[in-house]
Image: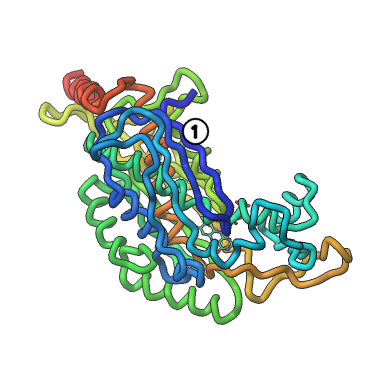
Amino acid sequence: MAALRYLTAGESHGPALTVIVEGMVAGLPLKAEDLDEQLARRQKGHGRGGRMAIEKDRAAILSGIRGGKTLGSPICLQIENRDWKNWSTIMAAGAEADLMGRRVTQPRPGHADLAGAIKYAQRDIRNILERSSARETAARVAAGAVARRFLAELGIGVCSHVTAIGDAAAVGGIIDRTESDWVRLAAQAEQSTVRCADSALEQAMISAIDRAKSAGDSLGGVIELAVLGLPVGVGSHVQSDRRLDGRIAGAMMAIPAIKGVEIGLGFAAALRPGSQVHDEIGYDRESGYGRRTNRAGGIEGGISNGAPVVVRIAMKPIPTLYQPLMTVDIDSRQPVAASVERSDTCAVPAAAVVAEAVLALVVADSLLETTGGDTLAQVRERVAAMREQALRF
Ligand SMILES: Cc1cc2nc3c(=O)[nH]c(=O)nc-3n(C[C@H](O)[C@H](O)[C@H](O)COP(=O)(O)O)c2cc1C
């Protein structure tokens, strides 16, 4: 069983999204603003659709926190869907509304629509798309905000930047960044409407999104993430399900529309000889063991090695197209244009915030598994001991 787990519930146009976070230690200072700050970051970004103008996400804390600190009990968070008032008849839990004439019957290619409708034997595709919608990721961001807060208390940070939107892409990757390089990069990305730290590339990304929008098309992209300050020894080589890289990859692929994950050099490592892939080990009296390069992306043998953990993910273009692709109507079985739900043109900047949240949750879980402990003070002591062990080894 995971040390830190979470479960979300809620339909896209239902009354609310809910998430229960279980396993967080007692004594962590946590305010509603910590959660709302992350929710607001997810809502930004050039290329978002009309829905984000309606929703101003805020998390209500229903349990697990008292007097500004966690209790060690399950933390239940709820995010109201403001759009619910426009959908309360169609989305009512009761059977009073006649929904026959309001069914969605034209599955969108690239979405869960058709496979989900067949699997759950639903003649109204809304019964699938309401839950497969990435609105659910707001709940993951709220849960991730708890994990982020916890990691921050231990000197561990998670950050990201966008390196490509469509074919507006950074040339070559620099993966040997130091922690301070990452901090600078992330601060620049935070100021950008596409979360891109390079201003020339940022303009190219914005134009690419605008062009796609006018063509009724959509765009994906690439996001790079880093975990900073992680001590040596999180994750383990001893069992496949304890490897940190495996857990990160699984969690990243479980974000809607994420279709590729790399750690460190990733796919590029396959094209180089070993002498240009592995990071030589050095030793310094002050800082202990270290590397000049970080091609491994901070993980060796499934264990964090003290360097920044570098993760790259690929997001496919949004499947809902305002110039829809062809599909088949599930009533008539005739070719038709796919249905259109209100949609983003590009959600790569938002997905970066979702990915940061998911990464924080995975790292907090693996860290807690290593340290144990029921209070923040106990974990703090254990993390200090891990850092000391790496330094004195
Ligand atoms: C932050 C975020 C926002 C998204 N917004 C939309 C959207 O507005 N319209 C849409 O069709 N898909 C959107 N998606 C993608 C779909 O949720 C996703 O493609 C779909 O659930 C099918 O899952 P799959 O792509 O993993 O196969 C978004 C994804 C993320 C991460």
Residue located at (41% from left, 32% from top): 74
Q: Compared with residue 7, is residue 73 higher up or lower down, i.e. above or below?
A: above
Looking at the rendered image, the quarter that the C terminus falls into is top left
Label 1: element kind: helix
Is the residue indicated by label 1 positioned so its CB lies within 8 Å of ligand 1? no
Residue located at (46% from left, 18% from top): 238
Tag 1: residue type? Gly
> In what quadrant does ligand 1 lie?
bottom right
Residue 326: where, in percent of width, then height?
A: 76, 69
Question: Residue 143 or 68: which is nearer the viewer?
Answer: 68
Q: Is residue 88 left or right of residue 30?
A: right
Residue located at (42% from left, 39% from top): 76
Q: Is residue 391 left or right of residue 323?
A: left
- Asked whether residue 171 appears in the rendered view, the answer is no
Q: Label 1 belongs to which residue?
A: 246
Q: Residues within 10 Å of mark 1 (few under 14, many from 20)?
A: some
Residue 223: where, in percent of width, then height?
A: 43, 55
Residue 252: where, in percent of width, then height?
A: 49, 44
- Asked whether residue 373 appears in the rendered view, the answer is yes
Q: Is residue 291 left or right of residue 127?
A: left
Q: Compared with residue 314, is residue 391 higher up or lower down, i.e. above or below?
A: above
Residue at the extreme front of the image, as rendered = 96
Q: Is residue 367 left or right of residue 254?
A: left
Residue 289: which quarter of the image? top left
Residue 53: where, in percent of width, then height?
A: 44, 70
